[in-house]
Image: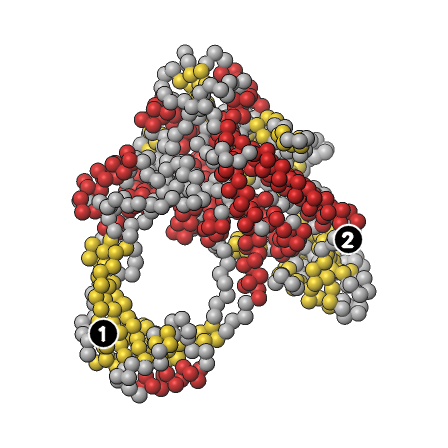
Amino acid sequence: MFKKLVIVESPSKAKTIQKYLGKGYSVLSSQGHVRDLPVSKFGVKINGKFTPEFEIVKGKEKIVKSLKSEALGKEILLATDNDREGEAIAWHLAKILNLDTKKENRIVFNEITEKVIKESVKKPRLIDMNMVNSQLTRRILDRIVGYKVSPILWKVFKYGLSAGRVQSAALRILCEQEKKIQKFKPQKYFEIGTEIFGMKTKLKIFDGIDLYKNPFSSKEAASEALNYILSTDFTILDVKNVTVTVKSPLPFKTSTLQQAAASELNFPVSKTMKIAQKLYEGVEVDGETIALITYMRTDSYRISDVAKSQAKEFITKNYGKEYLAKKRIIKKDALSQDAHEAIRPTYPNLDSDSLKGKLPKELYSLYSLIWKRFMASQMADSIYEKRTFTISDKNQRALFVMEFKKRKFDGFEKVMPTKGETKSFPKAHAGDKIEIVNPAILEQETKPPVRYTEASLVKKLEAVGIGRPSTYATIIQRLLDRKYVERNKKNLIPTFLGMIVNDFLTKEFPKIVNLRFTASMEKELDGIEGGKSNWQKVLKEFNNAFIENLNRVANDVKSGNLRVAVPTDVKCSKCGTRMVLKYGRYGTYLECPNCGERKKVPAGSDISYNGSTAHVKFSEPEILDEQCPKCGAPLVKRTGRYGDFISCSRYPECDYSRPIIKYTRGHCPKCGGKVIVRKSKRGKTFYICENNPKSCDFISWYEPSELRCPEDGETLYYKSRKGAEVLFCLKCKKEYNIEDSKKD
């Protein structure tokens, strides 16, 4: 029945495209990567050249078997995402399905609309091997760094840590900022505040000095100015009127969408990308699956002529011709690949108001943000009249400057209103006497540098050329997963572990965390994609320098010459010497460099670090309203290697202890009993039936739920996917959204 097989990455995308192509086409999903470097070994042969040893991703065997079966006797079109990673997935599929890579079997599109999809299947092209080689180079570079440096971190610190080429550079940015904050010493300064025209304002100039830039450094100097203000009269020296144009915004690219969603919707970067992916692949609206936005991984501001024409029609019809933007020339960023359009609605006439109540709240919020930004980018600039009052004494020693803005034409603000407009101007003219109401000295303090948020870190990474649109969310999530960084409200704060790992990498592997070097590697990858650089040569040059560095550090670790010992403010109880903090097999401990006295740092203790000295605040065990069955002393709750437990407060005199049993959200899939949460010797969480080993042998790395797979009726398990929790079936490998599964 089907003559052509189209293979895409996601099931929801397959469903949308199948609807457009109809009979004669079968659209299937590879569900992402199907082939990759092995998990359990290095997987790259280095013998004059670099040869990756790919294997089928664990759990994708059935998908591969199904794709091979469906491909028999059909023309294959590979429709994976139009970026390096998507190109690499298409190449892997071609290898698995034994397709001729010299034949045109690759199709690409930036939006999932009927017109674009039907046009794309008519124009297949060759797989772009430059893009593939660029992605392979990135993958091998990351494997070389991660697979070789991570084991050194295990020996120096603890098992489970990782070092990544881009991840480590991002960690350095956060740690350097944290050190600046720790070293910052606030300075007092003074301003003079008052009220004019019923609004609060501050003294702008005194004796020719701009106080906004150079405020008073002493209270005496501020007092002199205040006494002068109180002793003299003020009039309006000058009134200026100017017309101010506020330019319409550019449409979203990946980084600016992530930043706007973080600041306006409070979405973490990973959440923004997950929701954008759904909007791109297709969501149900009034019983019909519609792809609402174009591809969401892009570093371009470019808009297609068709989309511009549709926006022009919508703006003219709904707001009038005067709201149309004039021709705008956007300079291409030197770091931009410009592979895709900007992020925009696939159907500009489908305004956000028309979808209210038809989409889940979070999907609607992000779509509304994208639609308004795109439409605003195609609209005229807004125009304001700005009136500036300069208020001065007769000697012009003290000057106050007040600005007011009144909108004359709203332009793009018709769909994207901004704040700051004044409803009316003060009714005052040059020469009018002005009352300075309640002038007073304001004592202020300089503020430390601000910590990075996810949004500002993305902006920084983009500015210095580290990572690409498809990698920002992964970089941040990896830092969080490795416990190198913690979220505190919106801020990303390096942990003590993150700080000392960064110090170690900065000292021993300076190139890995060097921002310029990491950015230069991104340019090398761009060069490979553009056919200007040889991927094998790039790998060879990097590896030669890296291996020399690696061997030196590995030998130092092996010989015992390289040990991390962080100075602390904790004094030795025996000799009074300041102790140092070290990492051992069972975690952190304190050691006196003078007498060798050791002290354990209990789990849960708070360790802060300013880049030179660590401050240790020891955790105090929680006293329970329960007595020890052995000696009658109070029992306490403690935290150990394997989690929380209960023990005697007289430890080590009394050795009574028992574990605190934690149960999972679901019951045992085999016997229906309760399932206990435990940790392995290496700190990895696993799940075991409370009846094991008496009458049930259930044990799993995944937490069981109470829900069943709609396909085969098997138990669904919880797992993390790109920072979010999903449900998946061990048998059929399908994944499900938790909220959707609960509704079903």
Query: Circle 1 is placed at which residue position?
Result: 238
Q: Amino acid at mark 1?
A: Asp
Position above or below: 66 against 323: above
Q: Residue furthest front?
A: 532
Position above or below: 570 against 541: below
N-terminal-most mark, 2 or 1: 1
Q: Looking at the rendering, which quadrant does residue 126 occupy?
A: top left
Position above or below: 292 against 499: above
Query: Circle 2 is placed at which residue position?
Result: 561
Query: Dot 1: what SS?
Result: strand
How is the rendered protein coloured?
A: secondary structure
Where residue 285 sits in the image (x, y, percent)? 33, 33
703 and 158: which is toward the camera: 158
Q: Amino acid at mark 2?
A: Asn
Query: Dot 2: what SS?
Result: loop
Position above or below: 634 against 360: below
State which quarter of the image contains the N terminus.
top left
